[in-house]
């Protein structure tokens, strides 16, 4: 008995060996950087030289900085339009493909095509769309003007990415284009996870398709909807690649497309404007905002029960 | 309105949406064979005759294949290390009872929720201190600690691997690492493939981190190289060449998708259902 137990413990000690590489790399490349950023957010470190502790000065500066709030406003504006389109489209598609009356086929093919834009590197997407949407020479405007011509009308080209009014929305639409397939697959996975018995039982009881959707499908995929909403929020507030690559510092629209992450990048990594301590505080301020909003979001979802 | 007509309308709308997903790529491919002047005056789906010329302009500006090679040098080892060590860690956490097991698992859960921007500045500072700027090490080695992958594989091992299999091997005197390689890895290989492919796509497309770590042109990975394109090419004259560059940059990932789309879809689905 004693011998067996000792042998078992000996086996269990192997666990340390199995997790050791992970733990070492995790401590060095994940835990340390996060704590280091936290420490730096309380210092006045610029580019090089010594860091002096300055208390909450950086945080005070972040929360009273009108450019930070402007960047946060931009992020929220671009993200809200994006998320409404993205989740709205994914939700409609989910309704179509889970409908018990029409029983649409071809899901595997549509799913793959809808997911395709998500696969391409943001740099390639950004570059493709900046070229397509170019004000004078881009194919998109030329396409529209040819369609206008068919009807004998004249089209005045719109500078989709350079105009303050349209730049943010253009980026929102492209982001939704990139991500709706992903959200759709997640929602669909939830629907396919629902046992067929529920639908059959409801059909036998004579429930209509809207009753089935409202009373069975919707409540059962609620956890997945929450997951999709929370992950899109965390990802969305950190939006960087597309807005960064698609806006031009010299362009008039720059002030309306600069996101919080772009603001952080400016102070963290752009030569000439580096203020490491301040940038670290921006990172943690954004984290606090994301944390608060996602907790609220989860609470809101759970309250409806 | 009849059932068939309504169903037809639904299919029509689904196809319109599918076309909108494919149209930009189609325009990209067609435009990469046309001259800048042609593109800026008209649009068409008929390929032009300027492919060779566009190719010459593009390769005069930079070496896209060098960028591709650099991306492979980063993404392949990062993916393999990530998959292997995540499996090792997940198995260690799932199968052995030792002190700290729960703490590590809790840390994994916390770090899955923490947004990446929190570590960015600290990470860069660490790389400066260790003289790892312009090296591929900071882009490859951290893959060994991928909390999300470990979490997913741990759940998979708990639900698909029975203890008795490993215990039988122990009785036969098999070393622990041997049973891991010969018994565990084959059993979890579907999950491993799924995570591996997603990891590869993530590494291949990654932009912000390589941009921060690498600042020498010859070290640039494909996405970083693509981002410098806008500044370096004269748009109007060379529109065809820019489309060609984007087309080439997209091909490798499309190939991966052609072969593995089943795994990719299943991993997104799994990610949603597991939560």
Image: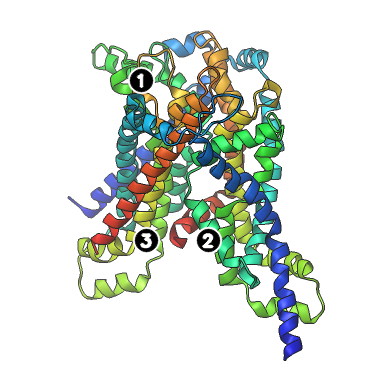
Name the N-terminal-most of marks 1 and 3. 3
Q: Which mark is residue A191?
A: 3
Q: Chain of mark 2?
A: B
Q: Chain of mark 1?
A: A
* Residue B226 image-quadrant placement: top right
Q: CA distance from mark 2 to mark 3?
A: 30 Å
Q: Are marks 2 and 1 on the same chain?
A: no
The secondary element bearing badge 2 is classed as helix
Which residue is at 46% across, 44% downward? A115
Q: Are marks 2 and 3 on the same chain?
A: no
Disc 1, disc 3: CB below 8 Å? Answer: no
Which residue is at 50% across, 25% downward? A275
Q: CA distance from mark 2 to mark 1?
A: 41 Å
Where is residue B120? Give x, y as percent: 55, 37
* Residue B249 image-quadrant placement: top right
Height in image: B256 above or below B49? Answer: below
Front disc: 2 or 1? 2
Height in image: B187 above or below A291? Answer: below
């Amino acid at each position: 008995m004693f011998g067996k137990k000792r042998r078992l413990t000996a086996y269990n000690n192997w666990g340390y060996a199995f997790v050791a590489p992970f733990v070492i790399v995790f401590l060095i490349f994940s835990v340390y950087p996060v704590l280091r950023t936290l420490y730096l957010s309380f210092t006045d470190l610029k580019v090089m030289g010594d860091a002096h502790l300055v208390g909450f000065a950086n945080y005070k500066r972040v929360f009273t900085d009108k450019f930070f709030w402007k960047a946060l406003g931009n992020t929220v504006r671009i993200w809200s339009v994006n998320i409404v389109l993205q989740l709205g489209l994914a939700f409609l598609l989910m309704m179509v493909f889970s409908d018990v009356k029409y029983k649409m086929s071809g899901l595997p093919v549509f799913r793959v095509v809808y997911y395709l834009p998500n696969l391409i590197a943001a740099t390639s997407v950004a570059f493709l769309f900046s070229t397509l949407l170019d004000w004078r020479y881009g194919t998109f405007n030329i396409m529209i003007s040819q369609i206008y011509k068919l009807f004998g009308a004249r089209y005045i080209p719109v500078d989709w990415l350079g105009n303050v009014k349209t730049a943010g929305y253009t980026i929102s639409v492209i982001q939704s284009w990139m991500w709706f397939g992903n959200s759709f697959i997640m929602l669909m996975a939830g629907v396919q996870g629902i046992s067929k018995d529920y639908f059959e039982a409801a059909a036998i009881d004579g429930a209509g398709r809207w009753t089935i959707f409202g009373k069975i499908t919707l409540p059962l995929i609620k956890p997945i909807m929450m997951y999709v909403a929370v992950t899109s929020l965390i990802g969305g507030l950190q939006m960087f690649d597309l807005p960064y690559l698609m806006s031009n510092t010299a362009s008039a629209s720059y002030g309306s497309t600069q996101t919080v992450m772009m603001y952080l990048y400016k102070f963290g990594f752009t030569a000439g404007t580096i203020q490491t301590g301040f940038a670290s505080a921006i990172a943690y301020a954004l984290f606090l905002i994301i944390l608060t909003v996602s907790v609220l979001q989860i609470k809101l979802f759970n309250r409806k029960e | 309105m009849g059932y068939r007509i309504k169903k037809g309308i639904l299919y029509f709308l689904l196809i319109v949406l599918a076309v909108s997903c494919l149209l930009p790529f189609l325009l990209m491919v067609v435009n990469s064979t046309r001259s800048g002047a042609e593109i800026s005056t008209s649009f068409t789906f008929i390929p032009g005759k300027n492919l060779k010329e566009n190719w010459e302009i593009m390769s005069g500006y930079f070496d896209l294949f060098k960028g591709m090679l650099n991306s492979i040098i980063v993404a392949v080892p990062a993916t393999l290390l990530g998959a292997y060590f995540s499996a090792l860690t997940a198995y260690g956490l799932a199968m052995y009872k030792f002190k700290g097991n729960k703490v590590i698992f809790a840390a994994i859960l916390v770090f899955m929720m923490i947004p990446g921007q929190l570590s960015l500045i600290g990470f860069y500072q660490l790389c400066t201190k260790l003289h790892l700027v312009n090296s591929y090490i900071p882009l490859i080695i951290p893959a060994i600690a991928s909390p999300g992958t470990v979490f997913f594989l741990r759940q998979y091992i708990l639900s698909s691997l029975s203890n008795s299999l490993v215990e039988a091997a122990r009785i036969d005197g098999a070393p622990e690492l041997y049973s891991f390689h010969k018994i565990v890895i084959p059993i979890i290989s579907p999950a491993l493939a799924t995570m591996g492919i997603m990891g590869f796509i993530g590494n291949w497309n990654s932009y912000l981190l390589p941009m921060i770590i690498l600042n020498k042109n010859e070290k640039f990975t494909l996405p970083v190289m693509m981002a410098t394109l806008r500044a370096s090419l004269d748009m109007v004259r060379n529109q065809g060449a820019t489309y060609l560059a984007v087309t080439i940059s997209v091909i490798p990932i499309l190939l991966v998708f052609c072969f593995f789309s089943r795994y990719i879809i299943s991993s997104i689905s799994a990610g949603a259902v597991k939560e």
